[in-house]
Image: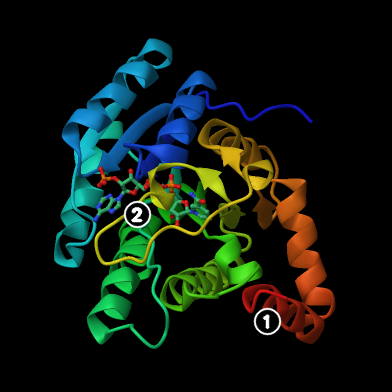
Amino acid sequence: MAGWSGTDRRVVVTGASSGIGAAAAIEAARAGATVALVARRADRLGEVLAQCRTHSPASQMVVADLDDLEGIDAVAARLADALGGVDVLINNAGVPKRRSVVDLTPADVEGVMRINYFSPVRLTLALLPGMLERGDGDIVNVSSMGVHLAAYRVSAYSATKAALEMFTEGLRLELGGTGVRARLFIPGSTDSEFSTPKPGNDEPFPRDPRTVSSAEEVGAALIASLADDRYITYATERDAASSAARNADPEAWLENLRRVFSGG
Ligand SMILES: NC(=O)c1ccc[n+]([C@@H]2O[C@H](COP(=O)([O-])OP(=O)(O)OC[C@H]3O[C@@H](n4cnc5c(N)ncnc54)[C@H](OP(=O)(O)O)[C@@H]3O)[C@@H](O)[C@H]2O)c1
């Protein structure tokens, strides 16, 4: 398959200061796109921007806290101004919530929902009119194998991504024929800061290193997914196979998980 060409594409990547977002932004710039990077940490964003500019000198950064929902329209306006319009929106910024249902507080649930669901929805709604006006655009929402594999001790987090998946399905169905394409990109375990100790979270789960992808591999797969019009792209074949196995027999899948999580 031919790779994606970013020539004449203006791409916004949220959560571009580290991990998958940083890798995807650099990959998009390498493919010829002009990129606008969004996150809170200006220093880290600046480092990623410098790498993007070696490929795509007009790339930009916008420092913003996407947790501030009332500020998102202004962020969208700054992004559209910085790029002269947005052709591709990659809603990648996200935070974990590792906490058992018996310990979760309403504030935990609402906080993770704000950044992982309400924020990308608001940004999408703010940038969609410009895409519809031009009759062209791509919206990539980054979900998680947390929806497709197991919600064990991550129920609040997985629920944010399940909500994002259904919102994306609505976009996909309703925008058919407008020239605006909505899609999902689904990473599995990826080596990034996401899986490091974080306040308000239980300790990261032990992971089998054989099943962990690098952020560079996953970021490259994300940008490659723009080359065709497939609705769902899994970061790896392994993730696609796991999702298919769960869908084929959900009860057997859950029974197996119960055995695994109870040490069986
Ligand atoms: N790593 C995995 O195993 C994995 C698996 C499945 C799905 N995912 C998903 O992949 C996406 C990227 O995760 P990652 O692994 O690359 O993690 P990461 O390295 O921790 O990156 C998360 C990014 O989100 C940004 N972000 C977080 N809160 C923000 C806020 N309030 N405002 C603006 N930006 C914010 C962070 O930037 P600042 O801190 O600078 O703001 C950072 O750039 C997430 O949506 C995650 O749910 C990850």
Q: Which label lies toward us, 2 or 1?
A: 1
Q: Can residue 34 be seen here?
A: yes
> Quarter of the image containing the N terminus?
top right
What residue is pinned by disc 2? 127
Viewed as shown, does residue 128 lie left or right of 191?
left
Q: Considering the image in quadrants, where does the C terminus appear? A: bottom right
Per the rendering, the mark at residue 136 is none
For the residue pair 29 and 96, the one nearer the viewer reads as 96
For this orientation, the residue located farthest to the front is 263
Of residues 119 and 156, the one nearer the viewer is: 156
Whether the residue under disc 1 has CB within 8 Å of ligand 1: no
Colour scheme: rainbow
Residue placed most toward the observer, 103 or 34 = 103
Secondary structure at badge 1 equals: helix
Q: In the rendered image, is residue 175 in sight?
A: no
Mark 2: amino acid: Leu
In percent of the image, x 36 and y 37: which residue is there?
A: 18
Identified by mark 1, the residue type is Arg
**Whole-percent x, y for residue 49 in the image:** 30, 24
Above or below: residue 198 compared with residue 14: below
Q: Residue at x 35, y 58 (%)?
A: 95
Answer above or below: position of 60 versus 132.
above
Q: Is residue 87 left or right of residue 152?
A: left
| Residue 238, image x, y percentages | 76, 51
Q: Residues within 10 Å of mark 1 (few under 14, many from 20)?
A: few
The quadrant holding residue 220 is: top right
Q: Which residue is mark 1?
A: 258
Is residue 228 shown above or below 174?
A: above
Pick the front one: 9 or 153: 153
